[in-house]
């Protein structure tokens, strides 16, 4: 299920890249540069015993590659911006192990604007979450941590109340896919890194995303070039 969704996202990203390149790059110039590149490569092969021709063809290959890169810069810049924005949410969905039932996790709150003594801090959790340990104080980091565990599959909000400040975090232990929630900057609960497996091959989701994108590129290129 997870890998199928990741493959679908990879295919959509590859399709978006094809469309973006067609809309934002100079297609006729790109085709001309490709022809120049291949012409220089064939010249190197045909006139391998002519140093002057080989040197000129090598310069032509380098020049054509530089011009191709410049022609591809607009879509690459747009795709890089979109990729940076989407990496965090995708990594939280595919790259982190979900909150398992009866498996302890550490919940940490970072206190801001703390002057002098520690304020009274209270942790409020849903009834299906058990707090296994008293708060651990990290004075230098201004952090407090609890060890918690879930007793059933559900979704709820954990509240950390410090004086007049309330920080919240949504905890979701339901089967994947779960609802995506933006992580609070004050309350964090990092999970172990997850790898995805196909036929015994376990890789990080970024590697599978790259492999799926490459595999999807061939049929998409054939369909869009018809």
Image (cartoon, helix red, strand yellow):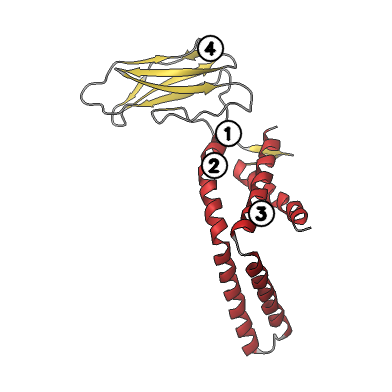
- Marks 2 and 4, the one that precedes in the sequence: 2
Q: Quadrant of residue 60?
A: bottom right
Q: Quadrant of residue 106?
A: top left
Q: Position of residue 196 (x, y in %)?
A: 65, 37
Q: Position of residue 58 (x, y in %)?
A: 61, 79
Residue 56 sits above or below residue 127 on the image: below
Residue drawn at the location 58% of the way across and 22% of the way down: 100
Quickly name the residue at label 3: 18
Quickly name the residue at label 2: 86
Q: Quadrant of the C terminus?
A: bottom right
Residue 129 sits above or below residue 38 on the image: above
Mark 1 burial class by Cα count in 10 Å: few <14, some 14-19, many 20+: some
Residue drawn at the location 61% of the way across and 21% of the way down: 174
Asked if marks 3 and 1 touch (Cβ < 8 Å), the reply is no
Q: Quadrant of the N terminus?
A: top right
Foreground mark, 2 or 1, reads 2
Quickly name the residue at label 1: 93
Quickly name the residue at label 4: 128
- Is 145 on the left or on the right of 98, as rendered? left
């Amino acid at each position: 299920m997870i890998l199928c969704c990741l493959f679908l996202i990879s295919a959509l990203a590859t399709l978006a890249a094809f469309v973006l390149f067609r809309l934002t790059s100079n297609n006729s110039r790109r085709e001309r540069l490709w022809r120049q590149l291949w012409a220089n490569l064939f010249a190197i092969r045909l006139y391998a015993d002519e140093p002057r021709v080989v040197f000129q063809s090598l310069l032509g290959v380098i020049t054509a590659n530089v011009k191709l890169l410049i022609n591809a810069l607009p879509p690459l810049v747009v795709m890089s911006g979109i990729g940076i924005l989407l990496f965090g949410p995708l990594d939280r969905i595919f790259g982190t192990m979900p909150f398992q039932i009866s498996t302890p996790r550490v919940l940490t709150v970072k206190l801001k604007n703390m002057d002098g003594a520690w304020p009274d801090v209270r942790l409020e959790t849903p009834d299906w979450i058990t707090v296994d340990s008293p708060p651990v104080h990290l004075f230098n980091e201004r952090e407090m941590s609890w060890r918690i565990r879930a007793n059933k599959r559900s979704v709820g909000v954990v509240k950390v109340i410090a004086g007049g400040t309330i920080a919240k975090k949504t905890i979701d232990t339901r089967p994947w896919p779960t609802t995506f929630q933006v992580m609070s900057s004050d309350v964090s609960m990092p999970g172990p890194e997850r790898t995805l497996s196909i036929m015994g091959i376990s890789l990080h989701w970024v590697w599978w995303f790259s492999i799926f994108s490459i595999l999807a590129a061939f049929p998409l290129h054939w369909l869009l070039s018809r």
